[in-house]
Image (cartoon, rainbow, N blue to C red):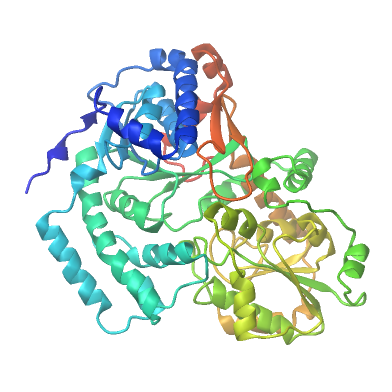
Amino acid sequence: MRHKAAKVARLPVIGPAIIDLARSLRDPETERAVRADLRQTAQELAWLRAALPEPTLAAKRLLIVSLSDMVYQLKIEAMLGAALKLAGWRPIILTNARANTRARRYFAAFGIADFLYLEDFAPTAEEAAEAEAEAARLLAGAPSFQAVKAWTFGGSWIGPQILSTVSRRRLEGAPDPAEEATRGEIATLLPQVLRRVRAAERVVAAARADLGLVIEANYTVYGPFVDRLIAGGIAVIQVTQPWRDDALIFKRLTRETRRMHPSSVSPESFAAVLRRPWGMAEERAVDEILAARYSGKWYLQRRNQPDTEDADPGALKRMLALDPGKKIATVFSHVLWDANLFYGEDLFEDYGEWFIETVRAAARNPALSWLIKLHPANLWKRARDGATGEYSELSLIRRRLGALPPHVRLLLPDTRISTASLFAASDFGVTVRGTCGMELPCFGKATLTAGTGRYSGLGFTVDSSSRAEYLGRLARLQDAPPMTPQLVLRARRHAHAAFILRPWSMSSFRSVFQRRERGVGALDQNLATVARSVAELRANGDLHRFAVWAAGNDIDYLEL
């Protein structure tokens, strides 16, 4: 059966009125604000649209997988699409449906009007039947967590996408497929994902892209498209925003790098960085960026440090009633339900099992004072998703461990103690692959990891190859040797690469954020136009730098 979407659809000029009216009736205040922002954006970017060349027939094609109507996401995607269109590329947008007028209009404001619509790639009868049959086969019996995680279909690793989607919906640790409710959710998701894999095959064939671009590369919505592009030998640029409001991070995903963390420094990049000169200017830059990350300078980092205060190590020990004669080991927990199956290999089945076994090991080792710091992102992520009730970490401790001994102290996400104070007071750090493993070693604090990825194996963390080795190290952590100056320098050089060289600094556009107590507003995150002419855009050079890197082959964007 041939599909109508064999060609790229052009932006229609009529038909959106009914859709817009429905949106206005549902939420008139939000729709008025969005339409005002859209008008302002279109007015401010008239010069950009006039400057964009019409792509030639031979132009390289960029497929932007844009399956959201979030204003900020649409503007980021459109900005980067415009950067490549300025360089002669043809950006093509995959959006859900023609009814998504918001997406079409924002892209049009940036001068991009080529679209594919996912609704045109609805499953054929054969594909629907195939999905049902394959779902029944995979669900036969009682698949375990690891069995589900290993599921693949059509070249797409669907298992982690499904498990992480279920986990994120519930805002809890890894789901257990043996539980009836979890099995029911998996059974509902599975045929949908299988159909999406087949749709992704046809979308990629229709787009004939030379390069892909996504903001989210995983979960059941985006994962199949990324996997399909990469399986066809088409690299995909993943775009993420670090703790800085004025920067983005780019990673080129290929068969070799698909499971690398998007913010990581690849081994090849790190080797190149190590060949560069190093001196006092770089040392000062590392000190300044580490201080800035916890100074409240940027909104995105500040939301992880709400209302915190610095305390020197002595004051912190008194505040928490810690034994002044003991060293401190701090466990920096991850958000248990957030993207925990995509990057690297874990020693434990999931973040939840790692967390509970690490706290158990801490309880069994009274030679140290242990601080268990729950990730502060729990606060804003739960507020964003409207979550209430007990933290997953506290529920796990209550159900699996019970009361903790006095040498183990919990620090909740809303603790008033700043992360910088914990870095100063701690003698050791413990994580799976959290950012603290990149930071603590810069201060000479040995940090244990419980999984690969991001920075493990680069020489400045204590990595274990098995659960037994990891737990054994926790049992005698008080006897661990201090870091050598050579290892501290290696950590600082890595931090320089990760925190200073990896971010792409924006100057032609500016991120704008506002905080709300719960939920998400359409314009809580926004992108404002700073440049007012082609000459200013060229003088800034930021979009040009991105376009040059995107057209190349380097895995990591580095501002060298």
Side (left or right) of 135 relative to 556 = left
> Is residue 276 in view from this perspective?
no
**Residue at the location (86% across, 70% down)?**
320
Estimate the x, y position of residue 463 in percent, counting from the top left.
62, 71
x 16%, y 60%: residue: 128
Viewer-proximal residue among 208 and 525: 525
Query: Residue at 67% across / 57% down in the picture?
Result: 438
Please state, as top left, top right, bottom left or bottom right, where the C terminus lies in the image: top right
For residue 109, which quarter of the picture?
A: top left
Q: Residue at x 49, y 60 (%)?
A: 339
Compared to residue 178, the image places residue 292 above or below, namely above
Please tell me how many numbered marks the rendered image carries: 0
Between 384 and 245, the residue placed more toward the observer is 384
Front position in the image: 555 or 508: 508
Q: Is residue 190 left or right of residue 355?
A: left
Residue 549 position in % (x across, y down):
47, 34
Q: Quadrant of residue 20?
A: top left
**Image position, residue 273 (x, y; %):** 61, 45
Judge from the rendering whether residue 71 lies leftward or rightward of residue 304; answer left or right.
Answer: left
Q: Residue furthest front?
A: 25
Residue 462 appears in view: yes
Q: Is residue 37 above or below residue 48?
A: below
Location of residue 248 in the rendering, given as x and y in whole percent from the top left corner: 55, 39
